[in-house]
Image: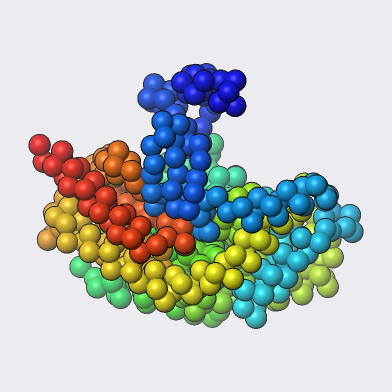
Amino acid sequence: MSDTYPLSNLAAIDAAHHLHPFSDMKKLNADGTRIIQRGEGVHIFDSHGKKYLDGFAGLWCVNIGYGRKEIADAVAKQMNELPYYNTFFGTTSSPTTLLAEKVTSKAGPRFNHIFFTGSGSEANDTWFRMARVYWAAVGKPQKKTVIARRNGYHGSTVAGASLGGMKYMHEQGDLPIPGIVHIGQPYWYGEGGDLTPAEFGLKVARELEAKIDELGEENVAAFVAEPIQGAAGVIIPPETYWPEIDRICKARNILLVTDEVICGFGRLGEWFGHQYFGVEPDFAPIAKGLSSGYLPIGGVLVSDRIADVLINEVGDFNHGFTYSGHPVCAAAALENLRIIEEEKLVERVRDDIGLYFAKKWGALAEHDFVGEAESIGLMGGLQLAADKKTRTRFEKPDPIGSLVRNHALANGLVLRATGDRMLASPPLVIRHEEVDEMARIAKLALDAAWKELRA
Ligand SMILES: *Cc1c(COP(=O)(O)O)cnc(C)c1O
């Protein structure tokens, strides 16, 4: 492309024709899009040749890092052999079926089936329908309502955005759709008040119990949550939270859904987030790290309890996507999982680099500008605070994080900002010295933003 269109023109063409997701388009068109041209390991390079350490793994997804030729080769081979076929009418392709076996083998004994989708949003739409179909099939058709959380993120389709608890998304397009209600989030720093984290974790978990009582257990299908809230700012729940949620779901006979789109595939140092927290979900939507983002593919892990009913009672589940189990995407995912296994990336996060990252990222909490800096595995959240001693947040949190992010970018590090929180999620292959580099630039960016704010 760059031969035909000089890169200087590309930004103008982009401004003229391309609408970007989650972007202030007027501002973006004025500022000009950054054009990312190449990736290698944990680094990306823009059209000016500037190199960045990608502390965010693309969008939480490039778990094995950029530029892995093995994936390109596996994709080319499959592309030449069979570029596409569907899974609808009694057919499959070998990478698709082998991927089903491989993924479920990592998800523990409760999961033996997967339903493939093209994305994480579609995965959430899929279990949302499947849960209702399940309850109808076992004679409880009124169990329909799904409970989700404020500031959860479950994608951008109509059901996904409704399940999500982002106010700024609900405001556009009349969401949430009926049958979805939200409870509080385990965000101790922001909302815990005088409670200890442990007390607060129990308190928010018990909002689930109260909501089930209010709606009537006979009307509630499921509860959905990310093991760790991602888009909300990498909010790590207090230790008391997940065991209590698990207990409540079991006691009240409602399905538990852990949205593993970020936490899956090694990010927390286990294959899946539910394994890290020791809970027993009925569904687990997945995507992102499934193919390390090399090609779009997602799915829903379906527990035996549900799969048995779907197979033996429901028969036909009238749902599916043209690209459900796309053979080329499946080939990319299979190769990705082979690499994760062979290079022991999950164990590496758990026993080595995740611990090192925790030390370096955690040390940023010493900064005057930082209220707390936490991580599990290679997923880190950092709270910016106006006054760290009193746990006081900024009155207008919104542009605060972007200040830090922009300084980090200028210094060659990609971090994400959500309001007054900084988010990190580097590729699982990141080396120790690259973690040092991340921490060094993050500190620089904090210094610069802090200075700017106080001026
Ligand atoms: C990214 C994300 C999704 C949506 O996935 P898409 O592939 O963008 O549709 C859903 N849930 C969580 C937790 C996510 O982070």
* Residue closer to the observer: 342 or 112: 342
- Count of numbered marks: 0
Image side of residue 335 versus residue 415, left or right:
right
Image side of residue 107 versus residue 242, left or right:
right
Image side of residue 22 versus residue 145, left or right:
left
Q: Residue 274's x, y, as percent?
A: 52, 72
Q: Residue at x 47, y 42 (%)?
A: 169
Q: Residue at x 30, y 75 (%)?
A: 198
Q: Residue at x 36, y 53 (%)?
A: 423
* Residue closer to the observer: 415 or 41: 41
The answer to whether residue 319 is seen in the rendering is no
- Quarter residue 305 falls in: bottom right
**Color encoding of the figure:** rainbow
Q: Residue 320's x, y, as percent?
A: 76, 52
Q: Residue at x 44, y 53 (%)?
A: 42
- Quarter residue 408 falls in: top left
* Residue closer to the observer: 352 or 90: 352
The answer to whether residue 238 is seen in the rendering is yes
* Residue found farthest to the right: 90
Q: Residue 227's x, y, as percent?
A: 47, 66
Image side of residue 101 versus residue 41, left or right:
right
Q: Quadrant of the N terminus?
A: top right
Q: Quadrant of the C terminus?
A: top left
